[in-house]
Image (cartoon, helix red, strand yellow):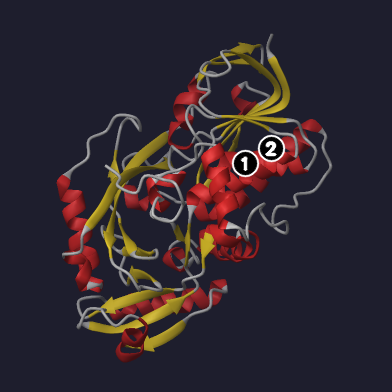
């Protein structure tokens, strides 16, 4: 017998889990499905940087404003899912000084607090900084542990009535007239799900999923490598003070740092090549800021696939494609009860979820407001409980494998 629900959310990354939580807290009956464990697609394969917005300030003011707002919210509600490290934009002698000057001015316009540091002051904070550091700018970046974040959102959704179905792949959709009448799922359920509204939160796989409903969503999946190496004692996130490029981010954990990343378009988010040059370049470039990582022991290496939305930008270089998010209402495409949420960043997952839940609530006649910006995540102050959520939803991934208890730390 088909499973009935008000809303079916497809995709169990941060955005999908956030949508399920948001709607469940509004009293909506929700089912979330993912083909694997939660966070397995992109969320738990990131570098784990919780952006202050400074990285995007001069190129994308709206995106920067979203980042600083959401970074503050997550700092308030996410507890042990976040480590409040702060961040530095590090200017080396080869870097254009106008870049940091412009970034600082635009951060001020956006409302992102900054502090300009001399080379000596920067080295007081990070003694192993490169000898050719000219100056640095402090910003309120942080580290985020995606496995915990996604699992805590799912746990809150579950505790408010949502059904979270992992290892339940979508196999097809039945379209009748201008509506999705049913979604066929396999795996643990192996049946149909009938929903009044269907949300596509499948990230890099959103185009493939939308095609099942005869809807076109033009995604440009883009891979990037992360390398975790042995290095303890780093406190702030390090960002290179230059236009975004390969190997310009170092994210601190406890006795490791995550080095990232590259940007290479792929045709298939499930089947793509990886290259040794990416690993070598990331390590080499990050070592320009923090020389000891050049020879530090490599703990694990992984690639993630960015869910870039590129309807008019297919010929643009991947780093130029917007990292903003887009909510696509497919009513105009003949699917009245279907929407896709695409693009975006882990930092802005909650805002993406709120925007999507607002649309769905409007369509269903639900008048309850969003409360996720003020409500702390369950287990936020108890890392052991958060890690129990990770295990329950099979949400572990390489991004925070050294932090979340019980996960395999070796990696591929």
In the rendered image, residue 185, in percent from the top left (x then y), is placed at: 55, 17
Q: 357 or 401: nearer the eye?
A: 401
142 relative position to 189: left or right = left
Q: Residue at x 78, y 42 (%)?
A: 26
Say which quarter of the image contains residue 10: top right
Say which quarter of the image contains residue 246: bottom left
Residue 154 got which mark? 1
In the rendered image, residue 65, in percent from the top left (x then y), is placed at: 56, 64
Can you see residue 344? no
Relative to 259, does residue 152 appear above or below in the rendering? above
In the rendered image, residue 84, in percent from the top left (x then y), is placed at: 51, 69
Q: Residue at x 60, y 66 (%)?
A: 72
Say which quarter of the image contains residue 182: top right
Residue 158 got which mark? 2
Circles 2 and 1 in contact, beta carbons < 8 Å: yes
Report, in whole angstroms, how far the alpha carbon at label 2 lies from the one at label 1: 6 Å
Q: Quadrant of the N terminus?
A: top right
365 relative position to 180: left or right = right
């Amino acid at each position: 017998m088909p499973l009935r629900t008000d809303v079916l959310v497809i995709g169990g990354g941060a955005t999908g889990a956030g949508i399920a939580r948001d709607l469940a807290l509004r009293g909506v009956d929700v089912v979330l499905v993912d083909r694997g464990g939660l966070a397995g697609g992109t969320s738990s394969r990131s570098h784990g940087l919780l952006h202050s917005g400074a990285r995007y300030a001069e190129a994308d003011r709206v995106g920067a404003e979203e980042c600083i707002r959401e970074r503050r919210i997550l700092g308030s509600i996410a507890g042990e899912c976040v480590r409040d490290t702060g961040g530095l934009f590090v200017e080396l002698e080869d870097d254009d000084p106008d870049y940091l000057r412009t970034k600082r001015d635009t951060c001020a316009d956006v409302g992102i607090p900054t502090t300009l540091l001399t080379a000596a002051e920067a080295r007081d904070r990070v003694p192993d900084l490169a000898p050719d550091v000219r100056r640095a700018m402090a910003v309120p970046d942080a580290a985020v542990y995606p496995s915990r974040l996604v699992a805590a959102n799912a746990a809150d959704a579950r505790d408010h009535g949502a059904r979270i179905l992992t290892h339940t792949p979508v196999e097809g959709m039945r379209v009748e007239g201008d509506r999705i009448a049913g979604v066929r799922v396999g795996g643990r359920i192996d049946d149909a799900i009938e929903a009044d509204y269907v949300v596509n939160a499948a990230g890099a796989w959103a185009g493939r999923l939308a095609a099942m409903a005869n809807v076109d969503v033009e995604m440009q999946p883009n891979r990037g490598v992360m390398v975790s190496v042995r290095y303890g004692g780093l406190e702030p996130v390090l960002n290179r003070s230059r236009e975004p490029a390969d190997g310009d981010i170092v994210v601190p954990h406890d006795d490791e740092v995550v080095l990232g990343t590259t940007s290479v378009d792929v045709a298939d988010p499930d089947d793509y090549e990886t290259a040794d040059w990416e690993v070598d370049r990331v390590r080499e470039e990050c070592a320009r800021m923090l020389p000891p990582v050049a020879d530090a022991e490599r703990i694990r290496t992984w690639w993630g696939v960015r869910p870039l939305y590129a309807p008019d930008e297919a010929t643009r270089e991947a780093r130029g494609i917007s990292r903003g998010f887009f909510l696509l209402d497919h009513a105009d495409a003949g699917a009245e009860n279907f929407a896709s949420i695409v693009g975006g960043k882990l930092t802005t997952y909650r805002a993406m979820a709120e925007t999507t839940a607002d649309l769905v609530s409007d369509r269903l006649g639900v008048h309850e407001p969003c409360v996720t910006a003020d409500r702390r995540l369950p287990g936020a102050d108890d890392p052991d409980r958060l890690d129990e959520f990770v295990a329950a939803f099979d949400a572990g991934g390489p991004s925070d494998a050294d932090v979340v208890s019980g996960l395999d730390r070796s990696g591929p």
